[in-house]
Image: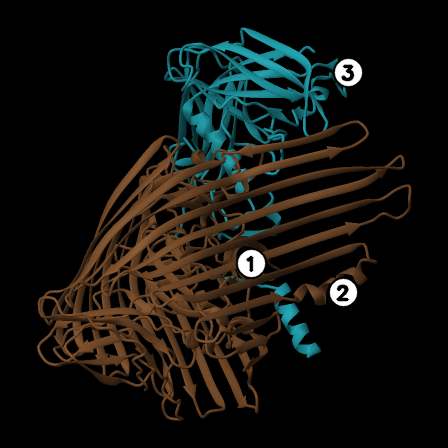
Chain colours: A cyan, B brown
Amino acid sequence: MKQITAIFILSLLFSCERTIEINVPEETSRLVINAQWPQNRLFFAYVSKSLPVTEAVSYSSAENRYLVKNALVVIKENSKTIDTLKWDSINVRYVSSKKRTKFDSSYKVEVSAPGFTTAYGYSYMPAYIKPSKIVIKKDVRTSSDGVLQSEVDVTFTDLPTTDFYLFRFRSLQGGFSCVNTNDNVVERTGLTSPFDTDHCFSGNKLLVKDETFNGKEKTIVFYVNTYDLNPTDDPLTHKPVKPWLELMHIHEDHFNYIKSVNLYDDVNGNPLAEPVNVVSNITNGYGFFSVYALSVDTLRL
Amino acid sequence: MLLIVIGSTSNKTVAQRVTISGYITDKASGERLLGASILHSSGSGTTSNAYGFFSLTVPANNDSVSLLISYVGYNTFSITLKGNVSKRITAVLEQLKTLDEVVVTGKRKSEIHKTTQMSTVSVPPVFIKNIPAFLGEADVLKAIQLLPGVQAGTEGSNGIYVRGGGVDQNLILLDGVPVYNASHLFGFFSVFNADAVSSVDVMKGGFPARYGGRLSSVIDIRMKEGNNQEFHGEGGIGLIASRLTLEGPIKKGKSSFMISGRRTYADLFMRPIIRKQNNNELDVGYFFYDLNAKANIFITEKDHLYLSGYFGNDKFSSNENAFGSSESGNEYKSGIQWGNATGVVRWNHEFSRRLFSNATINYTRYKFDLFSNERWLSNNTTESALQRYYSGINDISSKIDFDFLPTANHFIKAGGGITWHNYSPGAFHSKLNSQSYNIDTLLKRSFLTSHEYDAYVEDDIKITARLKLNAGIHFSSFLIQERNYNSLQPRLSARFLLTKDMSIKASYVQMTQFIHLLTNSGIGLPTDLWVPATSSVPPQYCRQVAVGWAWNYKNDYEVSVEAYYKSMKNVIEYSEGASFLNTFDNWEQMVESGKGKSYGTEFFVQKKKGKTNGLIGYTLSRTDRQFDNLNGGKAFPYKYDRRHDIKLAIIHQFNKRFQLSADWVFGTGVATTLPVAVYTDASGREIEVYTNRNSFRMPAYHRMDIGLKWTKQKKHYERAWLVNIYNVYNRLNAFYIYRDTEYDPATQTQRNVFTKITLFPVIPSISYQFKF
């Protein structure tokens, strides 16, 4: 009886793993372009390649198997070629030495490399939108964990067109640990934990579209942990640096891209959830290219 | 066979017709027999209804009325009632003595070729208990999975997917009360204790108008009424659970009871081991239990009262106690608990010889509760933090049904009801008790109530000796958030007798479902949430047409072939990336509403008599879904689309003492989505590229189980030893597949591979049963 019980318990506790062969259609390798530029920034692009999912690579080249170092990366501004990016081996990307993004311009990044079909992506610089008012009210409430929270009211004026935004609460340490809002214009993705009674959003992932306030002034009320509003010492200069708010005016495909990346992260490692395709706007390849208008405001407590 | 006319009254005939009415009951137990056939010498006939009542009105041509009453598994008998007058009788039938050479696997309703209703299979409890059982636990839903047109979900689970429908599209009724979550142990066992079950009917299509509320199937499970003649009991002791059922008369012949309980006890063995391994600081346990109870009382000759209930729970708990000293330490308790409760009061009343009513009030509740409670010592003061999430659904319902049999050519059923639904898709309770803070917060989310009204009328009409129709209409109305959904659902079934033992059938039904299940696991996790149709997520609709052929071969074999086409509207699916881990808020924004279609052919052969009996089923089918915002708007295969599905089950009784059973199932692999390419984003993170949703197949699923049963009749009881072997040839079926990396030292290369996870290899088990 003891043996039978042991067999039963072992059977219950240990499932089996076995490698299997599944015929996956031959997917040719494609160029991958990743580049998102705010205004007045030097051009850059991460260029790599996709690999068929079951392709074997040698140990020695495994780490760099996606890299493409011999690509020709051409930037066109308003349909005119204005720059060719150079390989930067330190940052493992292609960069421009002198050209920067401008308002009222459209851009095309075009990448070609031996053995690949030329890949490219388009984008144009959206209008600059800056908060007209940021009001911080200190310690207005306490989270269920007993953490003091401050209210940050951000007011801005939306354009009459359909617009998309990304808000990011940042400090030198990265995004704020917890941002709350009751405003339904903020997309319900990027929630830090489903069991979090405070309903925290990651400070880096606050996506907004203007469906309900198109062309009007809008105030979004956020709640952040008060300690996140304290300055952080810069490790190089040892001077305190205040946290800041980034308001990014982005395109719809950029909005969908960020959303899909958030969802991709949410389900990554969960075998029971339906997988997510990360949005790509690169013709003949993968990745994402976009330009956006960025405003930065210091958050002063 | 014994037929006793217990009571009779006479009336003068009206328009030269007489009505014979009454009940058919089992002699040994006193339980009423549903679906017994009553045939008049003129060829007119009827069947007893769900409560054993029958009424047959025939022309008064002679001085006597001759009836032939039959019920499979019982002796057939003819009786002649003298006098050309209406009579009320109670027919007490005696079960066939089980001979070595004749084994009947349970009671059966009318022969397959005679009924108007198609796409319906009765699964005898004896069959459920005799087929091989996973870990020795006979399981009603796993037996149903052996029927053609019914697909199992993932490995080991008791998910039911009928004719391409979703797991939420099955109306599972226990004594007429819906059961919302029919799973124990994360879907590996169903909540139905086979010992307490009296009958199981599975309808996959051709639904009569009296049923509504789900698109794909009705699984009608009835509990035993309890023996009103003598006291009996049965039970079993298995590796993971034990069970006991007792039944007997409260007042002989007048009232009876049945009570049945089951509990697992893995926790009793594992708790001490885990405790010992963790210096008594960790206590972990899991168990589930069921309790079924029923009482039925004959109040008067025309009034019968039933009371029944079910209560079951799963409970997982973990208690970590590290209070090392009086100055420091902490205690962490967490757990999950979920379960169903149902209760029903039913009153049968016979208004006249031709009019029978059944009034019910019922309650059903499903509840899920997840909690964590931490206590710690701080400066000699105990502080604590509690977090709790709970969700559920409960319904209170009342309804009345009438059976009216004006002539032998009509069997009219009509009724109506109202249901109050209360949904609580999620609530958080947070409580912090520390020296700095004292907070007690309850966040209720989306608590909803709705009202559902139903009314129906149907008539089983005998048009000619060969042609019979069942025509009906079901009306339902659903009121939620000031939105009112109304639905009129026509139902039509027809049967045409080709020969005396062969018929062709056809049916058309429309169904509406006002409830959705939020699940993307498909394995019956307790976190699956039932949510109502709302103003932004409309009800599900379905149309199904089916044609079929049925043959009753020498009363030994039932053979049927059916083809069906089903279209569904407003089925929901999670949006890309949404999962049960983030459904607790704004679930309406996380689902997509779309269309589905399903079509296929089912072949079914069933043998219910003889030393060897069993079934063979084969289904050739296709089912897909289409959502505007999923898969680029293109249709894709449903996860449980199975092109081929084969089921075999055989039970052979070698002699009175020894029985061998086996089943084998084969199914096309589960549709799944796999990456075809990988690239990196700007941060160097690998991103997988997927093509069409569910465009790959897991390896085909197949498995054989074997069961051996040794029975011995003792002086006062019967006992049996059962040995079951699940997955006898150790097929490693895939539960899910994931991408992994494989290193090959020989070629100094690495590559991505697909790895399958298998839950259950070969699993032997032994159990002991007794009956007295």
Please tell me whether mark 2 or mark 3 is closer to you in this view.
2
Q: Which residue is at a point 37% across and 93% down the rendered structure image? A: B101
Q: Chain of mark 1?
A: B
Residue A16 point in image, percent of width and height: 58, 64
Please tell me whether mark 2 or mark 1 is closer to you in this view.
1
Q: Residue furthest top?
A: A132
Q: In the image, what residue type sits under mark 3?
A: Thr
Residue B564 point in image, percent of width and height: 23, 59
Badge 1 element: strand
- The answer to whether residue B670 shows anywhere in this view is no
Disc marking residue A237: 3
Q: In the image, what residue type sits under mark 1?
A: Gly
Please tell me whether mark 1 or mark 3 is closer to you in this view.
1
Q: Chain of mark 3?
A: A
In what quadrant of the picture does the N terminus of chain A appear? bottom right
How many numbered circles does the render carry? 3
Residue that carries the numbered disc 1 in the rendered image? B312
Packing grade of label 2 (10 A; few <14, some 14-19, many >=20) is: some
Residue B744 point in image, percent of width and height: 59, 59
User: Where on the picture, by quarter, is residue B7?
Assistant: bottom left
Q: Which residue is at a point 50% across and 91% down the rendered structure image? A: B657
